[in-house]
Image: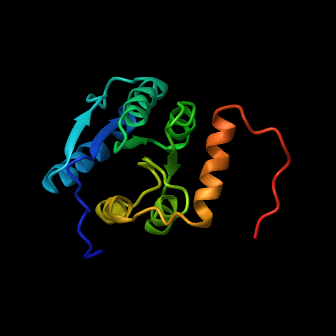
Amino acid sequence: MVKTALRKDSAVKVFVGSDHRGVSFKNKIKDVLQAEGYEVTDVGTNDPEVGCDYPGIAYQVATRVAASPEGRGVLVCLSGVGQAIAANKVPGAYAALCHNTEIARLSRQHNNANILVLGERFVDPAELETILKVWFSTPFEGGRHQRRIDQIKAIERGLWHGAAPKSA
């Protein structure tokens, strides 16, 4: 277990959502984050027995995160792939599919991800809390990574018109 506590910032608002295949993880995620003092907004779904379409859930979380300067989100579905694809269609939402703590750390350090996406089938339930703690406590490193984030934002705005730049 990682001994690092979640880095609580009162300005951070957390939006969580799942399709029917991720409800149990979503509920555990809410418990962990609320115990750490985060304000958590659950956008659904809440019934694991009634199928629902994940794009609507991803859109609800992604638009709220993108509209909140300090917003963070967590999405869950069976694999996490569909949630990540859908969330990343919203400008300002940067969703990273993470199945372990190393990817969770790198998604924050290097990519400044603001939405953590988890596939319930592929994340060990015993590692869920650790993944959350690592993701929420890891800061963006900036530096050379900021240049790349700026390039992603240029693509998002339709301003990327060239070949891949040479980099160090």
Quadrant of the drawing holding the C terminus = bottom right
State whether residue 161 is above or below residue 99: above
Q: Give the colour scheme of this rendering.
A: rainbow
For the residue pair 29 and 135, the one nearer the viewer reads as 135
The percent coordinates of residue 109 (x first, y second) are 49, 64
Q: Residue at x 53, y 30 (%)?
A: 90
Quadrant of the drawing holding the N terminus = bottom left
The percent coordinates of residue 134 (x first, y second) are 36, 65
For the residue pair 105 and 80, the one nearer the viewer reads as 105
Q: Residue at x 65, y 55 (%)?
A: 148
State whether residue 160 is above or below residue 151: above
Q: Residue at x 67, y 40 (%)?
A: 154
The percent coordinates of residue 88 (x first, y second) are 55, 37
> Toward which corner of the image does residue 8 lie, by quadrant?
bottom left
For the residue pair 98 and 63, the one nearer the viewer reads as 63
The percent coordinates of residue 130 (x first, y second) are 32, 66
Q: How many labels sit on residues? A: 0
Residue 43 vs residue 112: left or right?
A: left
> Toward which corner of the image does residue 152 lie, by quadrant?
top right
For the residue pair 33 and 127, the one nearer the viewer reads as 33
